[in-house]
Amino acid sequence: MLFKIKNCLPDQYAHDSDRQHALENLIMSSAFRHNIIILDTKTIESILICDMYNTNIKNYTHDIRSYRREYAGIANTLSTHAVVDFNYEGDICAFEKDKPIIKVSYKYFIDPKNLGPITLLTENLEDFKLYNIITEYYSHSISDHKLNFSFDFSLGGGSQIKTMFDNIKNSKKLVLCIVDSDKYHPNMAEGSTSSPFSKEDRENIDGSLAYIIDMREIETLIPTNIIQKIAIEKKLDEQIESLDDITTFTSIEGQFRKFFDHKKGLTLKEAIHIDNTYSSFWLDILGCV
C-alpha cells in the first residue's frame, strides 16, 4: 500500500520514543518492500542529518528519496491510499473529498507487527493465489505505474470469513476481503458466504473493505482462452468439448459464465428448477442451441 507521511518532525523526537519508533518502522516497511512510503523533502533531510537515526535508517531513507519523484504523484491516481499523520491521535478514519483516503495515526506503526503487507482475506488458499496472479498481471501488464505489490494471506474458511473479517477489522488492521457472490441466477440474492457482509463492510470506511465479486465464483475471472490453452496442452479432450459449449453459450448470453458453475456444470433439471424459481434465464440460453 502507499502511505503518505505528514506533520512529521524527525529531529524533535529525541524524547518522543513512540513517534521515533513509528517513523523508523515505516521506513523499515519500505526497506522490506511491504509498502511504498512517501516522505516530503524536508522530512527526508531532517532524518539524514539527525544523529538519533542509525546508518541503516538513513540508508533506507536515501532509497525513499530516490523513488519519491517516481511515486509521489501517483497517490491520486490510485483507488485508495493512506495518510499517516504524526499529529493525529485518533483511530483509523475515512473519506477525504469523496475518495477513500485512509487516515492513520502514527500510533498504528509503533507496533512492529503492523509493518507487514496489507492483509488479503480470501475463502481459501487457491483464491489467494489466483488474486495474486491477477494483481501481478494488472500491475505489470496493464497499469502505467508498474508497481510491485505484496499481500499478507489470511484464510477465511468459507462460512467463517465474515467472522475472520470482523476480527481483523476490530483489531484495527487494514484488510481487503474478496468473496464470491455464489449467485447462480441474475435475480437471485447473494449466497450465505457473502450476504452477511454489511453495507458498511463494503464501503472501506475504516481501512477495511469487503469486496463481493459480481459473479458466482472466482473461476469466472479466468479467460476462456487461457483455460482452453491449458486443456489443449494437457490433452483434456472432454474438457475441450465442454469449453466449446461454454463459448457457444456465452456468445448467446454474455452473462452465461457469470452465473455458471465451472466445477459441477448445469443439468437441464437444475436449469428448469432455477428458472421456475427466479424467472427465465438458463432455458432461454439452452433453447437457442
Image (cartoon, helix red, strand yellow):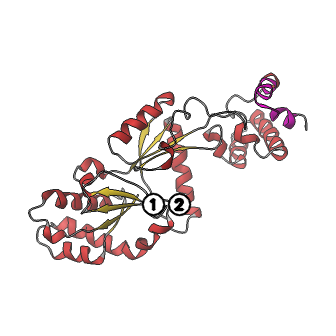
Element type at mark 1: loop
Q: Which amino acid type is marked by label 2?
A: Ser
Q: Residues within 10 Å of mark 1 (few under 14, many from 20)?
A: some
Q: Which amino acid type is marked by label 1?
A: Asn
Which of 152 and 171 lies nearest the eye of the viewer?
A: 171
Write down the residue under mark 1: 148
Q: Are marks 1 and 2 in contact (CB under 8 Å)?
A: yes
Q: Main secondary structure of the magenta part?
A: helix
- Seen in the picture, residue 89 relative to 54 is either above or below; the reply is above
In this view, the residue farthest toward the left is 15
Q: Looking at the image, which residue is at 41% across and 55% down? A: 94
Q: Quadrant of residue 195?
A: top right
How many angstroms separate mark 1 from mark 2 (CA)? 7 Å
Write down the residue under mark 2: 139
Q: Magenta residues? A: 271-286
- Seen in the picture, residue 247 relative to 161 is either above or below; the reply is below
